[in-house]
């Protein structure tokens, strides 16, 4: 029995990954010889906070020190590029139907790697807060957030489902024992091959809603 639904934001609720990838390319354009490796790391670690990405890139790809001042400059530049666009970036197909239908049937949570204050502001300005019991973001890890949700709701891990689009999302589900569904957009590589416990792969949230419909989320919409 599913009693708690936890959703990642980028790449699950909204199609923001192209926007964020373009921003990463721009802020690291000063290192063109490393750009392919930087972007590959960014894409492989979609569920990682931007600060952890910056630190890894400097330590392991650029092999340069990263001062707190440089880190904040990068973060400020990045937010300046993406924030307004995050308010209008398209929803994943089926996201609005799923949020409407499932939020009336069970508690919904966002667990994102976006800084929590920024995630709250994006959700507020997109009028999404009405669907969620709570919205989580970094600096807490996703596993820490999921554990908090389980403690708050009293749900067992088997009663909670996390929907994510990155191996880091799967890792958080694996560490906490919750169920996991992966969202992979059409044409994207499957980064979950060989990872145990992926109970379903969906291309969009219409497919997720259909998967959940029989167990918990009644549908008021007949959109396929």
Image (spheres, rainbow, N blue to C red):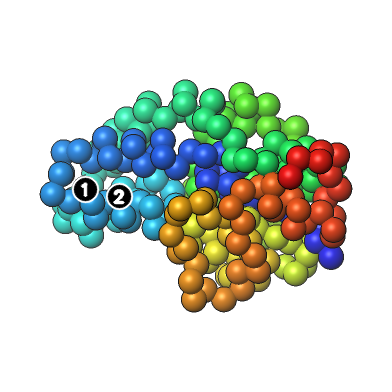
For the C terminus, the quadrant is top right
Camera-nearest residue between 171 and 17 = 17
Q: Which of the numbered marks, if any, corresponds to residue 39?
A: 2
Residue 55 shows in this picture: no
Residue 149 point in image, percent of width and height = 70, 55
In what element is the residue under mark 1? helix
For the N terminus, the quadrant is bottom right
Q: How many marks?
A: 2
Do the numbered discs 1 and 2 sit on residues whose CB atoms are within 8 Å? yes
Camera-nearest residue between 66 and 123 = 123
Residue occupying image coordinates x 58% and y 47%? 12
Residue occupying image coordinates x 37% and y 26%? 80
Q: What residue is disc 1 on?
A: 35
Residue 119 point in image, percent of width and height = 56, 36
Q: Residues within 10 Å of mark 2 (few under 14, many from 20)?
A: some
Residue 38 point in image, percent of width and height = 26, 51
Residue occupying image coordinates x 38% and y 52%? 43
107 to 181, vertically: above or below: above
Residue 18 shows in this picture: yes
Q: Quadrant of residue 82?
A: top left
In what element is the residue under mark 2? helix
């Amino acid at each position: 029995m599913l009693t708690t639904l936890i959703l990642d934001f980028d790449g699950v609720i909204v199609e923001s990954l192209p926007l964020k990838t373009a921003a990463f390319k721009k802020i690291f354009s000063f290192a063109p010889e490393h750009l392919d490796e930087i972007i590959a790391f960014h894409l492989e670690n979609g569920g990682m906070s931007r600060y952890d990405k910056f630190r890894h890139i400097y330590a392991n790809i650029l092999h340069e020190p990263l001062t707190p001042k440089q880190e904040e400059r990068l973060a400020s530049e990045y937010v300046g590029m993406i924030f307004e666009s995050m308010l209008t970036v398209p929803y994943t197909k089926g996201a609005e139907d799923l949020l409407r239908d499932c939020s009336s049937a069970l508690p919904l949570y966002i667990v994102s790697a976006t800084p929590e204050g920024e995630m709250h502001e994006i959700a507020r300005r997109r009028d999404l807060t009405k669907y969620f019991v709570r919205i989580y973001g970094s600096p807490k890890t996703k596993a820490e957030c999921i554990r908090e949700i389980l403690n708050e709701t009293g749900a067992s891990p088997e009663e909670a489902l996390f929907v994510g689009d990155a191996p880091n999302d799967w890792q958080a589900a694996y560490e906490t024992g919750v169920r996991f569904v992966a969202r992979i957009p059409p044409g994207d590589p499957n980064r979950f091959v060989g990872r145990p416990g992926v109970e379903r792969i969906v291309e969009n949230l219409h497919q997720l809603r259909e998967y959940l419909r029989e167990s918990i989320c009644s549908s008021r919409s007949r959109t396929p």
